[in-house]
Image (cartoon, helix red, strand yellow):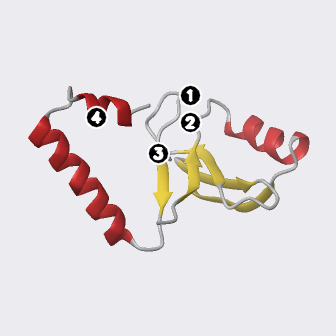
Amino acid sequence: MKASFEVVILPVADPDRSLRFYRDQVGFDFDVDYASTPEFWFVQPTPAGSGTSIQFGVGLTAAPPGSLQGLYLVVPDRWPVAAMVLICLCLIWYVGPDTPALKDAER
């Protein structure tokens, strides 16, 4: 199973300042810079050669600036992932979260 992060949403206090930072100082490529209304502005920079982008702007998340919310784990086939998650949930339900084997798996 192959999985990868594709988008990380960054809650920022000042989208203009963040745009200048990622464009002018860090040198990220900008895939999207779109505003449909003053309440919605969507910016998506991507590091050169990376498969993961960040998103910030206005109206993307209710998370406070400086926190991080909304990681997307993208997989080519969702069924093996769904089966794995279901098996893990069943194990936790059946044997309980305090089982030594499950505690070791968290490390």
Work out how far the residue at label 4 is from the one at label 1, CA to CA, in angstroms: 38 Å
Q: Earlier in the sequence, mark 3 or mark 1?
A: 1
Q: Which mark is residue 70?
A: 3
* Residue in the image at 43% along x and 36% along y: 62
Task: Give whichever of 27, 48 is nearer the camera.
Answer: 48
The secondary structure type at the circle numbered 1 is loop
Asked whether the residues under the numbered discs 1 and 2 touch, taking CB atoms below 8 Å apart as contact, a structural biologist would say yes
Asked whether the residues under the numbered discs 2 and 3 touch, taking CB atoms below 8 Å apart as contact, a structural biologist would say no
Q: Is residue 79 left or right of residue 61?
A: left
Q: Label 4, on which residue?
A: 101
Kind of residue sitting beneath label 4: Ala
- In the displayed structure, 75 sits above or below 8; it is below
The secondary structure type at the circle numbered 2 is loop
Q: Label 1, on which residue?
A: 65
Q: Label 2, on which residue?
A: 11
Kind of residue sitting beneath label 3: Gly
Q: Earlier in the sequence, mark 4 or mark 1?
A: 1
Task: State which quadrant residue 10 falls in.
Answer: top right
Kind of residue sitting beneath label 2: Pro
